[in-house]
Image (tube, grey):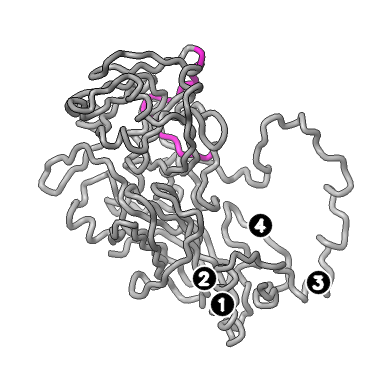
């Protein structure tokens, strides 16, 4: 087991920091003198051995705090002397009031047109790989709708033996699957193309979420209607909201791991995430995972819908548009410490982040604290799944000097996440979509963390 004395906390009052900023007492996990040989040995041997074996860390209480007597331990607190709330007071569980600051947020820098909007996931305050349903990012083209499932229908037509119309009851009687996948908007990190340094990871990367989705494999429905797989090369997915969002899905994807989903994280979809029915196209830009799904049509060519010919296209350096871009390439970002946070003292910190790839599993993540001059391999936390977020962690002892934190992911195909300079050499500077460049966070001498671009 880990020796608790190897993570000494300085005596004093524990301060809760907003939105999971690093608290003063935990940040001073090592002594003010930095790392002596004993602590180096601990980090090199005990910590890595224990993490590899999955051993939980022991209490971080210090001898000093215990010997002096901590009022929070010695004195009864108000919640220990009163009757708690009954179950019926909260028929649907909600987060603690002390976590009220952790919420989806709209960017003040984005133009809001009618009901079209974006709400970013607070990546800086999340743990593991699963995004809570209430914090899944939102992207609407004409506002979200709450559809009566009893009135909702899914039609499948086109190059099929027979057109079919399904009710929600029909669909939910069929064999279902549950799989964990990320959904990422193609414009995620888009503002970074033009050297716009938005302040926090919520705004740079917050248009990504990862959930467990439950529904029917699209391949099963295509078999039921007798889809013509010889002539039928594409599937058109049409949404039931006011924008009439439609997307062309290549048949090889449609027959692979695409899900017609009605549930997310063990419960029915939230209205803002497509209730009662949506498409989930793993690894592909989020706009293809059409919400409020009402129709699927099998065809022999791309459909050229408005949101794949005018919007969601990549403007290349030669002025041409790259259309029908789909795969979200390998990408990662450090979420803690990250922009807008502050390290309150020198000492030991756990650098944590997420990595993902639309082509499969993450194979490795490297972390640099000096702007990419030197890299160390991070610990990847299980489970490591295909087309899902993977959490990574690495130890770091901050000495109070300026630092630039970066992460670089490599997926199972061998693809390496590029620096922004290399991406711009191919894509130019006028793009919006599919920015998977390495993100840099600058740590100043006062501990403030900010967004910077390092080629």
Residue placed under numbered mark 4 in the picture: 16
Range of magenta residues: 135-150
> Which of 294/373 is in front?
294
Q: Is residue 228 magenta?
A: no
Residue placed under numbered mark 3 in the picture: 66
Instruction: Check disc 3 and report its element: helix, strand or loop.
Output: helix
Marks 4 and 1 in Cβ contact (< 8 Å)? no
Residue placed under numbered mark 2 in the picture: 395
Going 65% across and 77% down the picture, which residue do you hit?
6
Marks 2 and 4 in Cβ contact (< 8 Å)? no
Instruction: Identify the mark at residue 17; answer none if there is no mark.
Output: none
Mark 4 neighbour class, 10 Å CA radius: few under 14, some 14 to 19, many 20 or more: few
Give the number of the mark in front: 4 or 1.
1
Disc 3 versus disc 2: distance between alpha carbons? 27 Å
Marks 1 and 2 in Cβ contact (< 8 Å)? yes
Q: Position of residue 417 (x, y in %)?
A: 31, 59
Going 21% across and 23% down the picture, which residue do you hit?
299
Disc 4 versus disc 1: distance between alpha carbons? 26 Å
Give the number of the mark in front: 2 or 4.
2
């Amino acid at each position: 087991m880990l020796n608790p004395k190897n993570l000494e906390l300085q005596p004093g009052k524990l301060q809760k920091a907003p939105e999971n900023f690093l608290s003063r007492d935990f940040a001073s996990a090592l002594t003010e003198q930095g790392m002596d040989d004993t602590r180096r040995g601990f980090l090199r041997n005990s910590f890595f051995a224990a993490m590899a074996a999955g051993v939980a860390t022991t209490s971080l209480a210090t001898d000093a705090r215990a010997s002096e007597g901590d009022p929070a331990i010695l004195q009864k607190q108000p919640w220990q002397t009163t009757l708690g709330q009954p179950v019926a007071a909260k028929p649907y569980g909600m987060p603690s009031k002390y976590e009220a600051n952790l919420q989806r947020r709209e960017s003040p820098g984005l133009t809001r047109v009618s009901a079209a909007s974006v709400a970013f996931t607070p990546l800086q305050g999340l743990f593991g790989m699963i995004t809570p349903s209430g914090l899944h990012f939102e992207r609407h083209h004409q506002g979200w709708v709450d559809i009566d499932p009893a009135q909702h229908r899914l039609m499948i037509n086109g190059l099929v033996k027979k057109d079919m119309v399904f009710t929600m009851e029909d669909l939910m009687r069929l064999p279902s699957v549950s799989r964990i996948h990320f959904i990422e908007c193609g414009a995620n990190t888009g503002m970074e193309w033009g050297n716009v340094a938005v302040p926090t990871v919520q705004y740079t990367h917050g248009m990504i979420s990862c959930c467990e989705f439950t529904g029917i494999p699209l391949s099963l429905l295509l078999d039921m209607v007798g889809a013509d797989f010889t002539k039928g090369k594409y599937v058109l997915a049409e949404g039931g909201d006011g924008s009439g969002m439609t997307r062309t899905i290549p048949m090889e994807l449609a027959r692979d791991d695409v899900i017609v989903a009605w549930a997310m994280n063990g419960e029915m979809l939230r209205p803002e995430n497509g209730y009662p029915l949506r498409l989930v196209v793993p690894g592909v830009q989020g706009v293809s995972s059409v919400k409020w799904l009402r129709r699927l049509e099998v065809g022999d060519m791309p459909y050229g819908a408005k949101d794949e010919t005018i919007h969601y296209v990549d403007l290349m350096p030669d002025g041409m548009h790259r259309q029908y871009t789909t795969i979200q390439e390998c990408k990662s970002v450090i979420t803690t410490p990250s922009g807008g946070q502050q390290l309150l003292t020198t000492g030991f910190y756990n650098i944590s982040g997420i990595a993902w790839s639309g082509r499969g599993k993450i194979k490795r993540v490297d972390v640099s604290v000096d702007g990419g001059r030197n890299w160390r391999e991070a610990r990847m936390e299980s489970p490591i799944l295909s087309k899902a977020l993977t959490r990574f962690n690495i130890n770091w002892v901050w000495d109070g000097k300026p630092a630039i934190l970066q992460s670089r992911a490599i997926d199972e195909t061998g693809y390496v996440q590029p620096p922004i300079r290399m991406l711009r050499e191919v894509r130019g500077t006028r793009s919006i979509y599919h920015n998977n460049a390495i993100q840099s966070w600058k740590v100043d001498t006062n501990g403030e963390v900010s967004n910077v671009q390092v080629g």
